[in-house]
Amino acid sequence: MSNGRGGKRGGRPPGSAPKGARGAKKAGRGGGKPNNRGKGQPKQTGRRGEGQRGTTPLRPTDEDRRSSLGGDQVEGRHAVRELLMAGTRRTREVVLAGDLDSAPILDDIIDLADEQKVTLREIARSKFESMTRTDGAQGVLAIAAPLRATELADLMEPDIDGTKPFLLLLDGITDPHNLGAILRTAECCGVTGIILPRHRAAHVTPTVAKTAAGAIEHLRIAAVGGLPSAMKTLSSRGIWTVGLDAGGDRSIFDLPMADEPVALILGAEGPGLSRLVRERCDTVASIPMLGVLGSLNVSNAAAVACYEITRRRQS
């Protein structure tokens, strides 16, 4: 991602900390103040209280491990910048490949790491690639404290601004690219909480974190033993549970409870909603399919359904 500003940044030997480039860049900016929104501060979304936000110890206790969702290795430029900008968990180290061209987003990452006193290392490309766990890490990765799970009870409460719960339950979604894309959509359209099953489902791997492009830093995520039991708890608190399935009873565009406290449940591609989850739904809705194909990718279906609920809630 070069912006054509003069080739390589710095020309330092692989393995050295890029302090020279940081110092020179700072001098040219009048003291090194980063030039974007509230760097090093939490993104102000007007949502929720704490959730998984807050600093997690880098040496987790047994309780920390039980409540961890993963996410300790973050790869990709946007995901790493958002990790540092959010400031919701401790970042231990940022690692850069040594052959990167200069780009504004890389300058942002270096500035933010400086401000937060995060260790910044530049290493040879071959060594960098051996550390990565995703395809196309864009020459940047960070090591951070794991994400902390939120309690289910906290997700059932209105936001601090009075917004009614809009939850997203994911039933057996194991593809990390799909999960990451769904989380990105959920953050963008105002979902107030995510509920994942602890077993037989993807959690926050490096691929999920990269695909989500920083959304994991701003979402509250709960992990539960079983979705049917969690759905029963939600119903007892007056939250409508709406399954999304091709064989639904009504169209997602005709959902009378969309502006109420609502939980949308998505099933995995292929199997769809599991039997017990479908039985627990207050209603099952479908997305009208007008072409020859009979279904959408689950992340695309999530985008359609989530934004329809958001549209109804805003109107």
Image: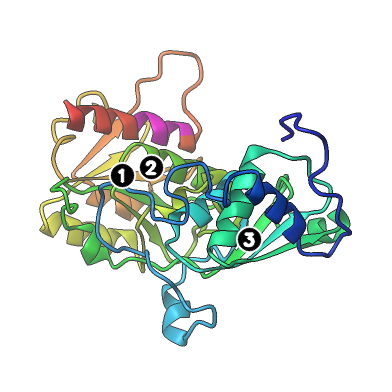
> Mark 1 — residue?
191
Identify the amino acid type marked 2. Answer: Ala
Question: Helix or strand or loop: what does disc 1 sit on?
Answer: loop
Q: Amino acid at mark 3?
A: Ala
Circle 2 Cα neighbour tier, 10 Å, few/some/many (<14 / 14–19 / ≥20):
many
What residue sits right under mark 2 in the picture?
Answer: 186
Q: Are marks 1 and 2 in contact (CB under 8 Å)?
A: yes
Q: Residue 109 at x, y = what percent?
A: 61, 51
Q: Which residues are magenta?
A: 300-305
Q: Is the Cβ of the residue at disc 1 closer than 8 Å to that at disc 3? A: no
Q: Residue at x 53, y 45 (%)?
A: 213
Q: Position of residue 232 (x, y in %)?
A: 20, 59
Marks 3 and 2 sit apart, C-alpha to C-alpha, by: 23 Å
Pointer 1 or 3: first along the chain: 3
Can residue 141 be seen at all in this image of the molecule?
A: yes
How would you rate the neighbour count of disc 1 (Cα within 10 Å): few for under 14, some for 14-19, many for 20 or more?
A: many
Whether residue 272 appears in magenta in the rendering, the answer is no
**Residue found 51% across the figure and 55% down from its top:** 83
Closest to the camera, between mark 3 and mark 2, is 3
Q: Which residue is mark 3?
A: 142
- Vertical comparison of 87 with 310: above or below: below
Instruction: Quadrant for the N terminus, please.
Output: top right
Q: Is residue 71 left or right of residue 11?
A: left
Q: Does 52 sit above or below residue 208? A: below
Q: Position of residue 14 (x, y in %)?
A: 87, 60
